[in-house]
Image: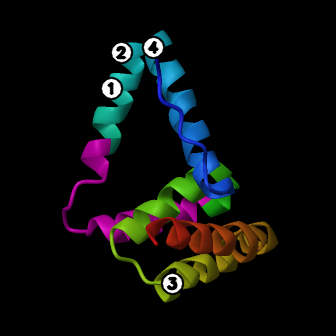
Amino acid sequence: MEHFHEPKNSTEEALYEYKAGLGVFTKKMPEIARLYNAFTEECFKEGALSQKDKHLIALGVSLHAQDEYCIIYHLKGCLDQGASEDEILETVGVTAAFGGGAAMSQGVTLVQEAIDELNQLKQ
């Protein structure tokens, strides 16, 4: 019997939905998933840029692309890598300077809500 964990909030639910979708895709397209995962793992390894910096960049790109699942995923990566709320909000600001109101609207709603919800999960 498979154990199901009830998400505690909308951010955790979005992370579960993403992982579930990725699992289905992996079963249907295992070679593509393997190559994609290997590529992204290599891209996010510590290098000239820290993993924290790479997640901050990915958060900015996700905001600009209006990809809510990636926004949440990379926001979690930022927090897991020790990014401060100020670093995250500066990333929102820089992205909004480039991406305009659409990036800002995600930053002042989804990002702030997800920061609060992810911090609640740590408690």
Residue 65 seen in the figure? no
Spatial CA span between label 1 and label 2? 6 Å
Q: Do the residues labelled 1 and 2 touch (CB within 8 Å)?
A: yes
The residue tagged 2 is 31
Q: Is the magenta stretch mostly helix, strand or loop?
A: helix
The residue tagged 1 is 35
The magenta stretch spans which residues?
41-62
The residue tagged 4 is 27
Spatial CA span between label 1 and label 4? 14 Å
Q: Do the residues labelled 1 and 4 touch (CB within 8 Å)?
A: no
Q: What color scheme is it? A: rainbow
The amino acid type, in three-letter code, at marker 2 is Glu
Residue 5 picture location, percent across and down = 53, 40
Above-or-below relation of 80 to 19: below
Sequence-wise first label, 3 or 2: 2
Spatial CA span between label 3 and label 2? 37 Å
Disc 4 element: helix
